[in-house]
Amino acid sequence: MLTKKFIVACIFFACCLSSAQAAHLLDRVVAIVNQEVITWSELYRSMEYDAVPGMKKLSEEERMKVFKENEAGFLENLINFRLQLQAAKELGIRVSDAEVQDAIEGIKKKYKMSEIQFQESLKTEGYSFDEYKKRLREQIIISKVVNQQVRNKVLATDQDVDAFLRDNRSFEGSTERFHIRQIFFKKPVDAADRTKTEELSQAVYEKIMQGQDFDALVKEYSEGPNRNAGGDLGFIDKESLAKEFSVALSGMQVGDVSKPFWTDAGVHIIKLDEKTEKKSPAEIRENARNAISNKLFTERYNAWIKSLREKAFIDVRL
C-alpha cells in the first residue's frame, strides 16, 4: 500500500511540474514494483507498443476491448520488465547513446530503410523518436542483464548431448524427411474391380499432368481420411515410409507428383511438397546442443524471474 507520506510527497512534487507531467504522475496506479509505480496509461501504452500488426488495424473501440480482456497478463509482463530493469540498475549495467544509435542503424540496415523511411515508420506507429530510443535502450539493458545473469551461465556438455540423442533418436535432422500429400483410392473388395481403380487413378494422374489443381482433385476423388486437409500426410521420416512410398519418392523433386502406385491399402498418387536432407553428425550434435541450451535457458530464466519477484515488493491494483 502507498503510505500517506508517499502520497503527499507525490502531490507536492506534481505541483512543481507542468500540467502534462502532473497528469501523468497522478495517473491511476495499477501496480507498485518496489519503489516504482506503473500507471494505467503506461500499461496501455505498453500494450499498444507490443500489439501485433493485425491488432493495430482494429478500431480503437475493438482494440481497447481486447486490451481490457488481456490487461492482467500484460501487467504481469510489464512487472517482470520493470524488475529486470531494476536488477540491471543494481548491477551497474548501462547502455550508451552510441550503443542505442548502433542498434538503430542495424534496424534500418536490416529492413533496408532510409532515415526518412525510418522516421515515417515511427510516425505511422504513433511514437516519437525519443520514446522509441527510450524503449530500445531498455530492451538492450534487459538483454545485457539476462545474458549476464542467465544465458552466459547455460552450458550444454557433451554428456548432455549424448544423453539427449539417446533419448530422442528421431531428433529433427537425424534423417531425411518428406512432406507429402496424396490422392488415395481404396483397394476394392472385389478383385475384379482392380482394373477400374487403376483406370480411375490413371485418369486423375493425367488431369494433374494437364495442369489441373492437385487440391481440387484431392477433394473430388480422394478416399483418404485426410481428404478435407488437402490429402496432407505431414512430414514423414524416411525410415518410417512404406517400401512403395520410398520407391516412388526416390526420383522425385519438390513439387513433383508420382504416377499411381499400389500398396496393400489401395492406390496412391503422391505430391512431394517439401524435403529436408539428412544432416551430418556434427550438425545433428550442434542442433541437439542448441535444443538443450534453449530448454535450459527457458527454465533458468523463469527461475530467475521468480526469484526477482519473490524478493520484490509487488502490489497489483487492477
Image (cartoon, rainbow, N blue to C red):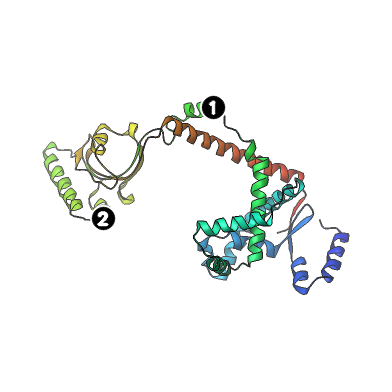
Q: Which mark is residue 87?
A: none
- Looking at the rendered structure, the kind of residue marked 1 is Asp
Q: Quadrant of the N terminus?
A: bottom right
Quick one: 64 or 105, which is closer to the camera? 105
| Residue at (59% x, 36% y) in the render | 296
Q: Which mark is residue 158?
A: 1
Vertical position of residue 13 compared to residue 169: above or below:
below
| Residue at (66% x, 56% y) in the render | 98
- Secondary element under disc 2, as helix, strand or loop, is helix
Quick one: 134 or 46, which is closer to the camera? 134
Q: How many marks?
A: 2
Give residue 196's position: percent from left, percent from top.
12, 44
Q: Quadrant of the C terminus?
A: bottom right
| Residue at (81% x, 70% y) in the render | 17
Horizontal relation, residue 258 to residue 135: left or right = left
- Looking at the rendered structure, the kind of residue marked 2 is Ala
Q: Is residue 72 visible?
A: no
Horizontal relation, residue 141 to residue 9: left or right = left
Q: Residue furthest bottom?
A: 19
Quick one: 104 or 214, which is closer to the camera? 104
| Residue highlighted by disc 2 | 216
* Mark before the other along the chain sequence, 1 or 2: 1
Q: Is residue 163 visible?
A: yes
| Residue at (76% x, 44% y) in the render | 311
Q: What separation in Å lies between label 1 and label 2 (alpha carbons)? A: 50 Å
Give residue 193's position: percent from left, percent from top.
13, 41
Vertical position of residue 318 compared to residue 282: above or below:
below
Give residue 69's position: percent from left, percent from top.
60, 60
Mark 1: few/some/many CA within 10 Å (<14, 14-19, 20+): few
